[in-house]
Image: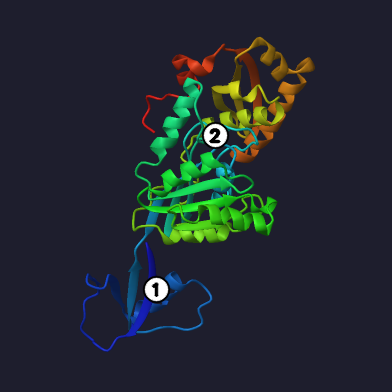
Amino acid sequence: MNSEFRIIPNSVSVCPRSGIDHLSGTAWAYVPPCSMALFTAFAFGPGIDYLLKGFFIMAEVKPFHSGFVAIMGRPNVGKSSIMNALVGEKVAIVSDRPQTTRNRIMGVVTQPEWQLVFVDTPGIHRPRTRLGEYMMKTAEQAMIGTDALLCVVDGQYIGQTDLALLREWGQHKGYKILAINKIDLLNRERLLTDIAQVCELGFDEVVPISAKTGEGMGALLKLLVSALPEGPKYFPDDMYTDQPERFIAAEIIREKALLNLREEIPHGVGVEMMSMKQVGKNLCEIHANIYCEKQSHKSIIIGKQGAMLKKIGTEARIDMENLLGSKIMLQLWVKVREDWRNKMGDLRTLGYDSTEEQ
């Protein structure tokens, strides 16, 4: 709880030791002269060059603010990049391939007076598989119970599908911000055209940003914080995501596959963590399966003499070592599961269980 101390001269010799003014929300305490030096060192820290004696200490208790913000948008508009930039950590994997995000992923920002919990969601698209249906259900459920919506569009192209979604989201109850992303790739005239298209769609704020360069991100964060209601601290100060290390490690492997493989393969790639255990003081051993849907895709993922699989593993291992702060021994296998994106058993195995409450 955040407090501001007020020092008030002790003009009354007989008084209670402490109390709370319930009308003003102020806590107070009397500190006698003999203990003031100890209080001063504790409350104000070292370096204080004066001593207060015989004073009342008034602590005005400020309410804590917190809330959940769902990040919505079509595939590849930069939702995950925005969340990573706001959180200051790599919470969600990023690639230039559509449908990179498949699960609901939370990113947490905590300051002394507030806590923001971002909910990154899969990009809105027309599903063609059961996996796609799971992703759309995940995105829809992420909006339920949130305190604000952060809707994102790619400023390079705002089409009719984008506008239709924005009209729908603009009717959502609660605080709504529209972020026009990738303005580092736009000229001023194009940006003004984009703003003119969306300014009457029901959003409380329209903010031009670039997740890549950081332009506008500070203003976006300030607006979101200003809209937070009073609430509890949902996560500890040092926690920046709700995802376990096993999930993040699997996502890192999938990210490296997305970044290195041909365009037709990534949609059919899934990662299953087989084991993750500490085998030494500074060594973690990880075994994982990379699944694909065709034998021909398996050959491409492995590459000539295993070169592609080795590249994916090396890049993933480096990111995992940065995440876990220890050396990683990573073993990868590539297996074929035909049409796994349409089989509920395979979806559950890979962590895409539509029966789970999101």
Q: Quadrant of residue 26?
A: bottom left
Sequence-earlier tag: 2 or 1: 1
Q: Picture quarter containing residue 302?
A: top right
Q: Quadrant of the N terminus?
A: bottom left
Callout 1: helix, strand or loop?
helix
The correct choice, above or below, for 326 with respect to 230 in the image is above
Residue 96, position as x, y percentages in the image: 65, 36
Residue at 43% x, 24% y is 353
Query: In the image, is 70 to the left or to the right of 269?
Result: left
Q: Is residue 240 above or below residue 340?
A: below
Residue 101 bears which disc, if any? 2
Farthest-out residue, bottom: 11
Where's residue 347, x and y in %?
A: 48, 20
Seen from the viewer's position, the closer of residues 334 and 217 is 217
- Could you say where residue 288 lies in the image, as x and y percent from the top left? 59, 21
Position of residue 62 relative to residue 280, above or below, is below
Identify the residue under disc 1. Answer: 39
Q: Residue 113, can we see it?
A: no
